[in-house]
Image (tube, helix red, strand yellow):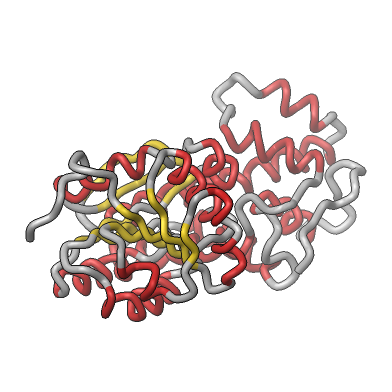
Amino acid sequence: MTTAHMTDSPPTLAFLGIGLMGRPMCLRLLAAGFSVRAFNRTPSKAEALAAHGATAHGSVDEAVGGASVVISMLESGAVVDAVMTQALPSLQRGALWIDMSSTQQGEALRFHARLQKQGCSFIDAPVSGGVAGAEAGSLAIMAGGTIGDFARAEAILNAMGRPTLVGPAGSGQVAKLCNQLIVGGTLNIVAEALLLAQAAGADPTAVRAAIRGGFAESRILEMHGQRMLDRNFMPGGQVKSQLKDLRNVLVAAADAGVVLPVTALVADAYASIEGEYPRADHAAALLALERRNPGQRLGSAPDQLPQK
């Protein structure tokens, strides 16, 4: 397959999915000087980027038709599959598709095989860092693909964060699942620690301050521990996304022949509030814990929750 090197001229990008994460990611690419063709199923979200230099397109085939690199940031593997089906007839031979959505490893491998048959390349490159990381251009980007394809993508990915090649196609999704396993588990442990502190008569705010800097320190304790104390559940990450990822972790574990009992418990906790708080920040692990402890509530602040 013959492809242009990234250093020859900046590639034209198609960015599919201008949502909570996709919008700031797209803005980082525009700020870095890339030409971006934007598409979203809600057209107004793509059109809103026109003021920043993007070209909004009303259909997937229009968006990808003039692009040498396609980036997708979509809700699920099923949505990526549907959008890819629409895009393939218009996708130019030799194009590189970078899927930054969180999907199952098996889905990523199927996308890779599908694109290879059409003479195109694929990298799965899910991210961690939430909306704040996307806005700052500091996302952790876990990439699965060939060394050559990663080299083509690296300058693009650098505009959005810190990319690391973790293995062949599908490996990016494995790395993201490992990340979400740790994040989801730690969120629930921090919720338990703060609720225990208060229930046992200590000041949970002071307890959080006291243990910071020790072995319990983490970004979760720093950021989401404070969110829990403030009862701020406005979305960065979301309950529905965390639960989707944890269920994908359990699928990957079953495929690999390992049992992950803690992850199963954490998934059950998020499942218990998915129906009522699907869009709440994943710090709402605290709400799931309080449901299991009637009469216990961390702090006295009112809950800040998104509309359903």
Instruction: Report the residue at 65% width, 36% height from top.
Output: 223
- Identified at 43% across, 42% down, the residue is 160
What residue is at 27 percent from the left and 54 percent from the top?
A: 171
Q: Quadrant of the C terminus?
A: bottom right
- Report whether 228 appears left or right of 223: right
| x, y percent for residue 78 | 42, 76
Residue 298 placement (x, y as % from top left): 83, 44
Of 36 and 213, which appears nearest the observer? Answer: 36
Who's the residue at 66% across and 23% down the image?
Answer: 211
Front position in the image: 67 or 265:
67
On-image quarter of the N terminus: bottom left
Q: Residue furthest left?
A: 1
Choose between 158 and 179: the one closer to the eye.
Answer: 158
Left or right: 190, with 50 as reference point: right
Q: Is residue 205 above or below residue 281?
A: above
The answer to whether residue 31 is left or right of residue 99 is right
Give how far across and how far down residue 191 sits, in percent.
70, 44
Query: Which quarter of the figure has residue 249?
Result: bottom left
Across and down, in percent, residue 103 comes to: 40, 64
Q: Is residue 219 at least partly visible in the picture?
A: yes
When asked about the image quadrant of residue 173, the answer is bottom left
